[in-house]
Every structure is written in structure tokens, then in C-alpha cells.
Image (spheres, rainbow, N blue to C red):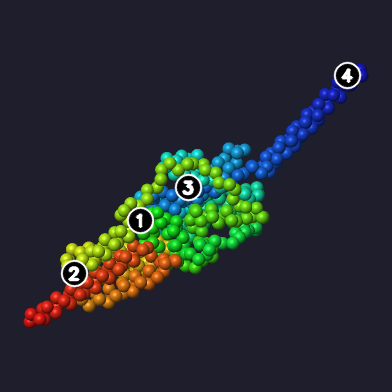
Amino acid sequence: MKLRRFIASWLLLIPFVCMGQEADSLTLARQDSLAITESDDFVKASILVATPSNVLYSCAGHACIRMQCLHYDLDVVYTYESEDVQSRVLTFLMGGLKMGMTYVPTKKLLSDLGGKGRGITEYPLNIPLDKRKNLWQYLDKKVAEGMNLPYDYLNRSCALACIRAIQGAILPDTLSFGKWDDRIVRKTRRTLLGDRISEFPWNRFVIFSIAGTEADRALTPINKVVLPADLIDVLQNTTFSGQPVLGDANELLCQTVEAERAGMITPVVVAYALLLLAFVSCFWLRRSLSFLLLALQSFFGLSVTYLIFFSELPATDFSWLIIPFNPLPLLLWRWRRWWLLPFGLVCCVWSIVMFAHKENPLVDPAHIVLVFALAVNYIGQWYQIRKTNQLKQIKR
């Protein structure tokens, strides 16, 4: 009888013992999960910087943010991109392209850039775990907003997108940028960009032709960080809670193909060749030379006029190029004997004024030489017309 009662008692206790074991297992699982999610390496964040290419919109390189969660096998790159420019150049010039935040698996990014021979360097972000989680949420939110922003290479550059993402993730805390480099403080966005892409003179010439005076506005230093190289220079001198924001650089992808530098035929060389032709036309008046320079002036004039008055492309509000390059000489060619000398003198003064802005150039050097060539051509034509009229009067 006692044996039966003992067995029955144990049978009744078994479910409670099992429930207790299950509860202990769940508690341990939760503790393990919490330990994993609160581990400092649960989420990793870093800045990736790609080397430049010959393409206009990537000749200064590219910056993006890499987010990793090894526990869930997640490794993606968040990057500020625009719609394809190469296949939609006219749409770009009209200001119709859109841009926004998107993401791509890191392996795919490495494969795509590696196939083009470009290199990638990684800089770990040394911010606390909760801020890294916030950064991931911030980037996901930006991706969800879609690519619905007007393309703006000055105010929405990849470098600015990275800084703004970090700033948004650490709120209400802030980054300590320390002392700004004099180069960032004194120079304009146009100059900073021009210095970084000086090895690509044709790209520099095109960008300086498109960018209006918005590129020369006085801004706070942080809003001038539009280029990947400047982004790294700034963040390497930045701290958060007394700790450096960037870790040591790690080369993820070695550059195997060097971006092609300009050969002998640069915009300045072409401009000097046209200047030589302009001097020749002063003493040996040939319609072909005059019409060549007029066609060049008219093409630039129509392009600049369109960008300023008709295009929705940002940063084309006004350009000093509209003074020498405008369609009026083409429209008023019939009455050129009245305006050739005044317009030539205006071009001379314009060239001198633009040349005086050496520290923060308002235009590309090739523009100055081209405008001086126009001045020589128009003054030379005025002189030839005046000389011809004097000879006619003598013969009478």
C-alpha cells in the first residue's frame, strides 16, 4: 500500500518537475539571446570608400555605410544612389533624375566594383552598440522612403549622406569634430571638388560648366564635406564620447585598374589652340575661323542659358559663364560691327576678374582662356571691319 502511494505521488510530481525544467530552459534561452544581442560585436558598422573611376559622377570616388550582424548572417551596404545618368543624360540636364538611399549585399558590391578594377577601403565606426542599432534603423527608414528626391550632387552627396546618417543615429548626442582644417574652412565646395578631381581635367571642366554660383556659397564646414576623401579626413579627427569615431583602415578590395588620366589633349590645351586661331584671324581674316569660334560661343551660350533659365537641375541657379557665353552674338550677328568691340572688351574684363579668383576659382582655367580667345576674335573682327571700311572710303 505504501509503495502504491509513493509511485502515485511521483507520477503527480513529474509534470511540475518538467514544467520547472522548461521554465529554466526558456530563462536560459532568453539570457543567451540577450547576451548575444547585447554583445558589442552583435552589430558592426563601417564606412566604405571606393576609388575613383573615369565616369563623371564617380570621378571623386564613392562613400557608403556597411552594416553587419553575423548572428543573423546579415551583411549589407547602404548607399546614396541616383537613377542611371549615362543612359539618361538629357533627363539629368533637365533636372528630372531622382535619387535616394538604397541597399545592396556587400558581396554584390564587392563583385561589381571588383569587376571594374576599383578598390574599396573600410573604416570601422567606433560608436556604442545602441547607436549602431539606431544607425541601422535610420538607414532602413531612409530606404523605405524610396528614391524620390531630386538629383543633387552638391547638397545630397554620398559623403554628406554618411555624416547625416551618423548624426541622426546618435541623437540626442553629437559628434565632436574638433578643429577644422583650414582647407575646409577657407575653400568653397567648387574648389574642394576641383582640387580632388584635378587629375580628370575634362570631368572638372564639365562640372565647372554645369555648377552655378550655389557651389561658391559660404557654408558651415560640415556642409562642405561633399567628397569621400574629405569625409575620411574629417572623421579621422572626430570623436564621440571622447573616443575616435573611425577605426584603422582595412583594404577590402585592391584596386587593379587605374583610372585613366588625361593625355595631352586637355581642355586648357584645346582652349590655347583656339586662342592661337583667334590671333591668326586678327591678321588673316578667314570666315571659317570666325565661324568656328562663333559656333563654340553659341553652343556654350545656349547650354548655359538653358541650365540657368529652363533646367530644374539643382545648383544651376546662376553662372558667371552667362556673361561671355550667351546666344546674343548669334542672334545679333547681322549688326556685329556695333557690338564686336564692346563685347570683346567685356570678355577681356571678365577674364581678368575670373583670373583674380585664384584661391576659390569661379570657373575652370580653360573657360578663362576660351573667353580671352573670344575677346581676341571679336576685337580682331572689329579691327578688320574698321580697316575695310577705311579702305573703301579712301577708294571713294
State which tag comes first along the sequence, 2 or 3. Answer: 3
Q: Secondary structure at mark 1?
A: helix
Count residues near mark 2 (Cα–Cα under 10 Å), then give few for <14, some for 14-19, many for 20+. Answer: few
Camera-side residue of 296 and 131: 296
Judging by the rendered image, the residue that carries numbered circle 3 is: 50
Coordinates of residue 45 in the picture (x, y in percent): 58, 46
Q: Secondary structure at mark 4?
A: helix
1 vs 4, front mark: 1
Is 243 situated left or right of 75 in this image?
right
Q: CA distance from mark 1 to mark 2?
A: 31 Å
Q: CA distance from mark 4 to mark 2?
A: 129 Å
4 vs 3, front mark: 3
Q: Secondary structure at mark 2?
A: helix
| Residue at 18% across, 73% down | 384
Question: Hey, what amino acid is under mark 2?
Answer: Phe
Judging by the rendered image, the residue that carries numbered circle 2 is: 283
What is the residue that sits farthest to the left in this orientation?
396
2 vs 3, front mark: 2
Question: Hey, what amino acid is under mark 4?
Answer: Arg
Mark 1 touching mark 2, by CB under 8 A?
Answer: no
Judging by the rendered image, the residue that carries numbered circle 1 is: 202
**Quarter containing the N terminus:** top right
Q: Which mark is residue 4?
A: 4
